Amino acid sequence: VFILAIESSCDDTAAAVLENDKVRSNVVANQLIHQEFGGVVPELASRAHQQNIVPVIDAALKKANISKEDLSAIAFTQGPGLMGSLLVGSSFAKSLSLALDVPLIAVNHMQAHILAHFIDEENFDKPDFPFLALTISGGHTQIVKVSNYFEMEVIGETTDDAVGEAFDKSAKILGLPYPGGPLVDKYAQLGNPKAFAFTKPKVPGLDFSFSGLKTAILYFIQKEVAKNPEFITENLNDICASIQHTIIEILMDKLKLAVKETGINRIAIGGGVSANSGIRKTLKEAESKYGWKTFIPKFEYTTDNAAMIGIVGYQKFLIENFENSSVVSKARIAL
Ligand code: ATP
Ligand code: FE
């Protein structure tokens, strides 16, 4: 089975070809244009998708060394995401499936961040069901109980900002360019995580809150910069390490509670923020520290990519969960 997968939910245009559960190609075109604006500009994103989509799909087919006539189905991201961006991918997928007369498969982007763990990769184990997924990305922060490929229940989520936003907004306060998450990670690796303390939010149960942290960081930085205008440049590594440390503690506290409440100790992380080196290290250490089994995705399947859309496409192909071209894109969809 050959699946062509298309992902265009936000600012990256991505296409992948899977042969069953193996990735033959995985191509992403990043849109650097948004850096100037300090965030994704939806109208610019959809225009850039229109320019990128044909070359990205051509590149994915070429790298996979197959022609479009070999494809068994076309999978695309139905949502959640930016409507103008989603529509570029879905229109293309619909036309291609009609032209080639192959099935069309709609994929939920957040399910894909979780099911990326089922891509067949050497040295990467697939989690047994049930497991807990911690999805941490630019728009979401959820703890999901995954009972089967398509049986998922959100048992905790953010009540305000997502973790990715917490990283990006903190970075912005520090004057770092968008998206700042990877930069905070980079500087954090050189700093002392205990240099500065930020209060952790008190949120009941398995839910999260990150907006208070952002405000605490803003006030802290304003106060210190008033005393010493060079404060940020002189302490950038320590500030980043301390912010990242606080975020990781918030996530770990909730994971520990989730394990206690569900009795499930298999934990898989997914979403763009699961690229973070501190989070990856902490999760790995949790295996010996707490006796958990943790699953950390291959780096290229953390931030938005089409391979993860392809693996869901493959699972849906096996159960013949197909759509016709009247299927609509959705800016918001539940898991
Ligand atoms: P969603 O999946 O919720 O729709 P999205 O698709 O926009 O959101 P992803 O691509 O999954 O988001 O994740 C992007 C986020 O991940 C950004 O906020 C980015 O800063 C963050 N991120 C990426 N790499 C790292 C890293 N190494 N450390 C911290 N954050 C990171
Ligand atoms: Fe995403």
Image (cartoon, rainbow, N blue to C red):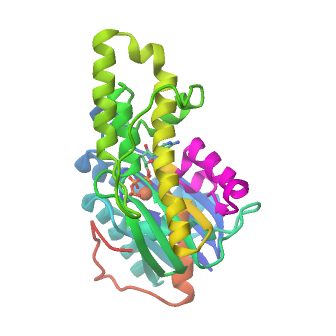
- The residue at the point 59 percent across, 42 percent down is 277
| Residue depicted at 57% across the width and 66% down the height | 116
Q: Picture coordinates of residue 207 (x, y %)?
A: 37, 61
The answer to whether 189 appears left or right of 224 in the picture is right
Q: Please tell me whether residue 73 belongs to the stretch shown in magenta.
A: no
Magenta-tinted stretch: 274-302
How far from the left and from the top, in percent, is residue 259? Answer: 55, 67
Q: Does residue 193 appear in this view?
A: yes
- Relative to 287, 192 lies left or right: left
In this view, 184 is above or below 140: above
Q: Is residue 290 left or right of residue 308?
A: right
Q: Quadrant of residue 20?
A: bottom right
Expressed as whole percent of the image width and height from the top left, the position of residue 289 reads 69, 54
Task: Quadrant for residue 27, please give it.
Answer: bottom right
Q: Quadrant of residue 78?
A: bottom left
Query: Front-most of 4 and 228?
Result: 228
For the C terminus, the quadrant is: bottom left
Give me the residue at 29% from left, 30% from top.
218
Q: Position of residue 228 (x, y in %)?
A: 34, 9
Quick check: is 298 in the magenta stretch? yes
The answer, for residue 33, to whether it is visible in the render is: no
Magenta stretch: dominant secondary structure: helix
Q: Is residue 149 above or below residue 85?
A: below
